[in-house]
Image (spheres, grey):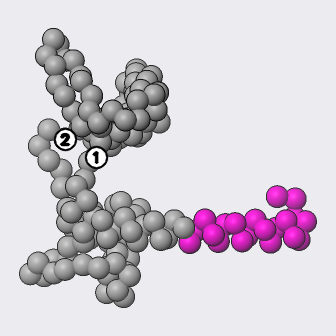
Amino acid sequence: MNAPGQHNALPDAEAAALARESASALARLLAEKPEAERAQIRLDGADLIVPRQAVSLLRDILAQMAQGNAVTIVPTHAELSTQEAATILNVSRPFVVKLLEQGEIPFRKAGTHRRIRYEDLMKYKARMDCDSREAMDALAAQAQELDMGY
């Protein structure tokens, strides 16, 4: 899934600080101009007009960089291997295969290889994140009821 020219390196401290400032400035501009459908960007004297969605995406990328995270852009219709899905979910590849075979995540077979739509993987991840939050809330409530000092 690594495309030529893709930059997966973690941002250094200088890049993270610049990203933080830029993300804040973009967030302010987007809030101040909610009706604006496009933006003009100047780079070395050349002007470029981009859609608002691209500016919002850039703000999100910069926010991640500001936190020291590397960022990869994946089209929602992209198909992933089981190893790529495992990396995104931070689990083993055999665990992903088990989830697929149990019907937890839709997939298709290309020959002997399983392919998972990125969008389907993110739906599964969102469900699991929600379930985890609910379980943690229930545990916290139980700890409060039992006066465990949490």
* Number of marks present in the image shown: 2
The residue positioned 40% from the left and 71% from the top of the image is: 124
| 112 falls in the magenta region | no
Report helix, strand or loop for mark 1: loop
The residue positioned 73% from the left and 70% from the top of the image is: 139
Residue 6 circle label: 2
- Callout 1 amino acid: Thr
Other residues around mark 1 within 10 Å, as few (<14) / some (14–19) / many (≥20): some
Q: Quadrant of residue 114?
A: bottom left
Q: Nearer the viewer, residue 112 or 115?
A: 115
Tell me which secondary structure the magenta stretch mostly adopts. Answer: helix
Residue wearing tag 1 = 72
User: Given the current orientation, which residue lies at the most extreme left position?
Assistant: 111
Q: Earlier in the sequence, mark 2 or mark 1?
A: 2
The residue positioned 16% from the left and 81% from the top of the image is: 109
Q: Quadrant of residue 69?
A: top left
Find residue 95 and report its horizontal and vertical position in percent: 38, 76
Residue 147 in sight here = yes
Residue 68 in sight here = no
Horizontally, residue 68 falls left or right of residue 117, namely: right
Circle 2/circle 1 CB separation < 8 Å:
yes
| 144 falls in the magenta region | yes
- Callout 2 amino acid: Gln
Other residues around mark 2 within 10 Å, as few (<14) / some (14–19) / many (≥20): few
Q: Nearer the viewer, residue 18 or 53?
A: 53
Q: Whole-Å distance between the Cαs marked 2 and 1? A: 8 Å
Horizontally, residue 46 falls left or right of residue 71, namely: left
Q: Nearer the viewer, residue 34 or 73?
A: 34
Report helix, strand or loop for mark 2: loop
The residue positioned 72% from the left and 71% from the top of the image is: 138
Which portion, as a residue range, is magenta? Answer: 131-150
